[in-house]
């Protein structure tokens, strides 16, 4: 018999305890980076998401779209500027951001998941009052800070066997539109759902220490120290801030992992070693689903 098929069967057998452990679990995945512009990588990610749903995991995909936004802003001659890893968003920029995120990027991911046999539904934080925002910082313009999440629409989609794909656009109390950092939006949704897992996919192997080694088990004091010393910087700041805030809000565990690695989400959920940098709940009675205990 072909050795590859034998290895495949052994892998499936070894995954059984993790498949059982995650039955009915809610897993929020932040998808972003250059993988969204690569058709092969997008299809691979879509297969992983459909696989999760097939084994009774409830995935929610929250996506970014930075490269596509940058490209369109460049074509329109609108300058991009970032503060603490977040895009400064003026009135002209927010129109482009909403167009790219809610239109082009969201529907591309929905189509990819549906093309792999899933039932994906695209929406934004403005739909059904999913995410209510207030201004994050006057310096950032129309960048929103989530202040309320109503996950009812997501639970309804779970009940129908559907996969929500959420663009990080929210609404203010006065009806204004806000751009939300993708990691922040994913953390808010995971917190509102009390998710079992929040996976933040990035373009690096994970959170690294001063020696360049990946932190496999992140502790809050480590994160604060590395941030103060400038080792955690740029776009990794909102990721680590999101991870710690989500844990405090009741998410069982957060992992920052390399979305460029094939099947990264499945490796994290359904194998013994997992992947990336893990932060987990430590309160009595709350145990992460992961095997890294």
Image: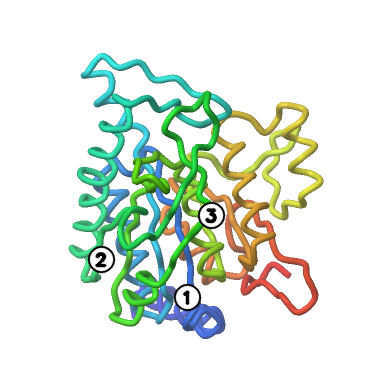
The image quadrant of residue 87 is top left
For residue 257, the mark is none
Give the mark toward the camera: 2 or 3: 3
Q: Name the residue under label 1.
A: 11
Category of crowding for the residue at label 1, using alpha-carbon neighbours closer than 10 angstroms: few (below 14), some (14–19), many (at least 20): few
Q: Name the residue under label 3.
A: 187
SS type, badge 2:
strand
Give the mark toward the camera: 1 or 2: 2
Q: Name the residue nearer the viewer: 107 or 90.
A: 90
Q: Where the N terminus falls, by quadrant?
A: bottom left
SS type, badge 3:
helix
Percent coordinates x, y for residue 23 in the rendering: 48, 83
Q: Distance between the residues labelled 1 and 2?
A: 27 Å
Q: Is residue 144 above or below residue 249?
A: above
Q: Where the C terminus falls, by quadrant?
A: bottom right
Percent coordinates x, y for residue 94 in the rendering: 32, 32
Q: Name the residue nearer the viewer: 229 or 84.
A: 84
Q: How far apart are marks 2 and 3 (CA)?
A: 20 Å
The image quadrant of residue 226 is top right
SS type, badge 1:
helix
Category of crowding for the residue at label 2, using alpha-carbon neighbours closer than 10 angstroms: few (below 14), some (14–19), many (at least 20): many
Give the mark toward the camera: 1 or 3: 3
Percent coordinates x, y for residue 202 in the rendering: 49, 43
Q: Determine contact: label 1, label 2, CB under 8 Å.
A: no
Q: Mark 2 points at which residue?
A: 120
Name the residue located 47 percent from the left edge and 50 percent from the top edge. 185
């Amino acid at each position: 018999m072909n050795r590859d098929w034998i290895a495949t069967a052994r892998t499936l057998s070894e995954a059984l305890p993790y498949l059982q452990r995650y039955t009915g679990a809610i897993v929020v995945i932040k998808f972003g980076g250059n993988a969204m512009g690569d058709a092969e990588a997008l299809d691979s990610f879509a297969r992983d998401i459909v696989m999760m749903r097939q084994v009774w995991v409830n995935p929610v995909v929250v996506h970014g779209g930075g490269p596509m936004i940058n490209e369109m802003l460049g074509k329109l001659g609108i300058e991009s500027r970032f503060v603490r890893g977040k895009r400064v968003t003026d009135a002209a920029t927010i129109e482009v951001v909403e167009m790219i995120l809610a239109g082009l990027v969201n529907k591309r991911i929905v189509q990819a998941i549906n093309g792999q046999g899933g039932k994906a539904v695209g929406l934004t934080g403005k739909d059904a009052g999913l995410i209510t925002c207030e201004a994050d910082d006057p310096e950032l313009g129309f960048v929103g800070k989530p202040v309320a999440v109503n996950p009812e629409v997501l639970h309804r989609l779970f009940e129908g066997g559907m996969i929500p794909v959420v663009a990080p656009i929210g609404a203010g109390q006065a009806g204004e539109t806000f751009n939300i950092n993708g990691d922040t939006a994913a953390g808010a949704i995971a917190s509102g759902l009390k998710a079992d897992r929040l996976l933040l996919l990035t373009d690096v192997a994970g959170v690294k220490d001063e020696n360049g080694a990946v932190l496999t088990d992140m502790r809050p004091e480590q994160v604060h120290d590395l941030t103060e010393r400038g080792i955690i910087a740029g776009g990794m700041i909102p990721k680590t801030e999101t991870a710690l805030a989500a844990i405090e809000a009741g998410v069982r565990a957060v992992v920052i992992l390399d979305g460029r690695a094939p099947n990264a989400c499945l490796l994290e959920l359904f194998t013994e070693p997992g992947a990336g940098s893990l932060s987990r709940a430590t309160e009595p009675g709350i145990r992460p689903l992961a095997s890294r205990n």
